[in-house]
């Protein structure tokens, strides 16, 4: 599928932790949009560009498939969704949405590193990243997918450890968990489709990426 109707498309999170900062970046890059009746799409009025507002999990696919030309998403989501197919290309880190995917356990464990979870069960919403990490560490563990409330798993005796995103650490603390080793460091990134846009939109795409880069550089 290719970009249609002579307009570029930028995929952004509809609501959630990255939504406001994504729109701030787009506005600071000089784009003005109108919020219409269409919740999925904001139409940019000063350029032939549409902002496509979706779940963050869908952004890598939209961009990899060429349905959108650019996207703003957490590296954790991009990495989790990587597969053998065509992938979106990272243009640049954006300096917001920082968080760390960490192993955590209850305190009563003599922690010797990830090998302390050998043969144990680990709950996570990021099974692909975790499995790659464990393979790299030579640890065999039973990875179970939980889509939410991962932090309750140890107390509920569903798992010995968890692998979850941490920013302030308040959620781990509130659940009596201790952060252990880091599995993956993440922040929001700008991603680009491997499919080029229509020829007449190529310069606009380059100029939008350059302006975003300028905004990021000046925000230090
Ligand atoms: O609806 P949609 O699918 O789009 O949103 P979502 O609910 O999947 O994602 P959202 O909005 O929660 O997060 C979007 C992105 O923000 C994530 O993919 C990360 O790249 C980034 N991000 C940054 C975080 C956090 N910080 C974060 N702290 N995502 C989630 N958390 C959660 C974490 O899972 C845990 O439950 O916050 C809790 C821990 O926070 P602290 O501060 O208590 O440590
Ligand atoms: Zn999501």
Image: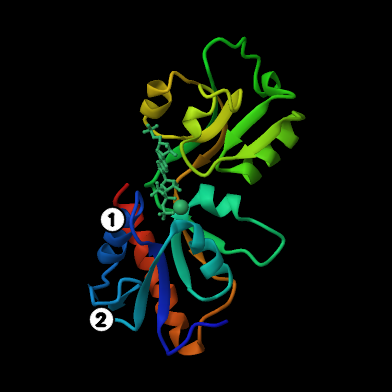
Q: Is residue 217 left or right of residue 37?
A: right
Q: Is residue 68 left or right of residue 87?
A: left
Judge whether 189 appears above or below 109 on screen: below
Q: What residue sits 40% from the left and 52% below the top?
A: 94
Callout 2: few (<14), some (14-19), or many (20+) C-alpha neighbours within 10 Å?
few
Q: How many marks?
A: 2
Q: What residue sits 55% from the left and 54% below the top?
A: 78
Q: CA distance from mark 1 to mark 2?
A: 20 Å
Dividing the picture into quadrants, the one containing residue 29 is: bottom left
Colour basis: rainbow
Judge whether 77 appears above or below 67 on screen: above
User: In the rendered structure, which disc, 1 or 2, sits on the residue that comes first in sequence?
Assistant: 1
The image shows residue 144 at horizontal and vertical percentages of: 64, 37
Q: Which residue is mark 2?
A: 46
Judge whether 84 appears above or below 149 on screen: below
- Dots 1 and 2: beta carbons under 8 Å? no
Q: Which residue is mark 1?
A: 20
- Nearest the viewer among 71 and 212 is 71
Q: Ligand 1: give its quadrant.
A: top left
The numbered dot on residue 102 is none
The image shows residue 14 at horizontal and vertical percentages of: 35, 61
The image shows residue 150 at horizontal and vertical percentages of: 50, 34
């Amino acid at each position: 599928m290719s970009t249609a109707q002579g307009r570029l498309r930028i995929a952004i999170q509809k609501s959630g932790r990255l939504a406001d900062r994504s729109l701030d970046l787009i506005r600071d890059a000089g784009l003005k949009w109108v919020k219409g009746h269409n919740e999925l799409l904001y139409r940019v009025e000063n350029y032939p560009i549409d902002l496509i507002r979706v779940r963050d999990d869908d952004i890598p696919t939209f961009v990899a498939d060429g349905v959108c030309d650019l996207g703003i998403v957490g590296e954790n989501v991009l990495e989790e969704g990587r597969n053998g197919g065509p992938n979106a290309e990272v243009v640049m880190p954006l300096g917001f949405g920082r968080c760390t995917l960490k192993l955590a356990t209850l305190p009563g464990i003599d922690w010797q590193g990830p090998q302390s979870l050998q043969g144990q069960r680990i709950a996570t919403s990021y099974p692909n990243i975790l499995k790659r990490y464990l393979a790299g560490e030579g640890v065999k563990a039973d990875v179970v997918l939980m889509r939410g409330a991962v932090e309750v798993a140890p107390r509920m005796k569903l798992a010995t450890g968890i692998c979850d995103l941490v920013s302030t650490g308040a959620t781990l603390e509130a659940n009596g968990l201790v952060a252990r080793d880091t599995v993956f460091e993440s922040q929001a990134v700008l991603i680009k489709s491997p499919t080029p846009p229509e020829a007449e939109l190529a310069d606009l795409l380059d100029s939008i990426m350059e302006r975003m880069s300028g905004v990021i550089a000046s925000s230090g």
